[in-house]
Image (spheres, rainbow, N blue to C red):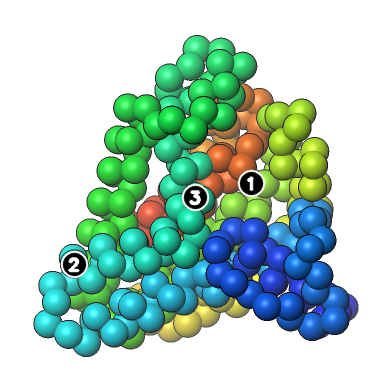
Amino acid sequence: MTDPARFLADLAACTRFFSRLPLPKLGPADDPDTPPDFRRIPRAAPLAGILIALPAALIGLILGWTALPELATAIFIVGTLAATTGALHEDGLADVADGFFGGTTADRRLEIMKDSRIGTFGALALVVSVGLRSVLLATLLERFGAGEAMILFLGAEALSRTLMVWQWSQLPSARPDGLGNRFGTPDRRAAGQAAVFGALCLLPSAVALSVPALSLGLILAGLAAHGIGRLARAKIGGFTGDVLGAVQQVSAIAFLLGLAMIP
């Protein structure tokens, strides 16, 4: 059985690591100064995804009740989410695009990914990512209204982090000094718990959507996460923090794409 105090501490640790939200100490088991234990805390990633996306969802809800065009509202949502995370996952996506398609060997790809400068492939990936997310969110705002659209947005953020944990637990670490070797990787129990919490977080979306739309969104998101994982194994031999960020970004977009494709 999950200890509520321990889970709350894991949720806080996960939220702090993946965002810039200034969370205070949450309960007696929470120690903000302790390094994260990635063997366990990723189980809270789906719920952390919702907490991290709440400021952006609130902005979307408020602006959705104004006469502002849906696309402008969607851009504000995407921008607020990036500010909340410190563009952590966007940076990962750009690094993966630059490294995977700009290098010819695994070592060279890892070297490029570690470089803080952004290249042509990374810039193009960000343009496509931000553009697609904005257009897809605008479509949902127009189709469902602000309230239901923000529920779907939160569901996408929870699902994408569930799939991130899935790939995280399946792939070996690509760097000897990477996240996996420093802080561990999610064990089977943590990955299973993340899947359960992710499914629970999707229940409100399931109420709002038709079965075909939800099914297509889930299928596309799963295929996207799996595809990034397979590509990472082929290109660099496993995962890095950048790869996990790319999984989150691409699977969230794929889920929204599936929802938008079926009325």
Label 2 SS: helix
Q: Is residue 239 above or below residue 194?
A: above
Callout 2: 10 Å neighbours few (<14), some, many (20+)? some
Q: What's under tag 1, amino acid-wise? A: Gln
Of badges 2 and 1, the one in the foreground is: 2
Q: In which quarter of the image is residue 255?
A: bottom left
Q: Position of residue 192 (x, y in %)?
A: 74, 62
Amino acid marked by disc 3: His
The local secondary structure at tag 3 comes to helix
Q: How crowded is mark 1: few (under 14 residues within 10 Å), some or many (20 or more)?
A: many
Give coordinates of residue 216: x percent, y percent. 40, 59
For mark 1, what is the residue?
A: 167
Q: Which mark is residue 2?
A: none
The amino acid marked with disc number 2 is: Ala
Side of 82 where 243 appears, left or right: right
Residues 103 and 224: in front is: 103
Q: How far apart are marks 3 and 2 (CA)?
A: 22 Å
Residue on which disc 3 sits = 89
Question: Is 72 on the left or on the right of 244, as rendered?
Answer: left
Outermost residue, top direction? 104
Q: Quadrant of the C terminus?
A: bottom left
Quadrant position of residue 2? bottom right
Q: Which of marks 1 and 3 is in front?
A: 3
Mark positioned earlier in the residue sequence (2 or 1): 2
SS state under label 1: helix
Query: Is residue 220 visible to us here?
Result: no
Question: In the image, what residue occupies the spot 28% across and 43% down?
Answer: 127
Instruction: Identify residue for label 2.
Output: 72
**Residue 207 x/y as whole percent:** 43, 83
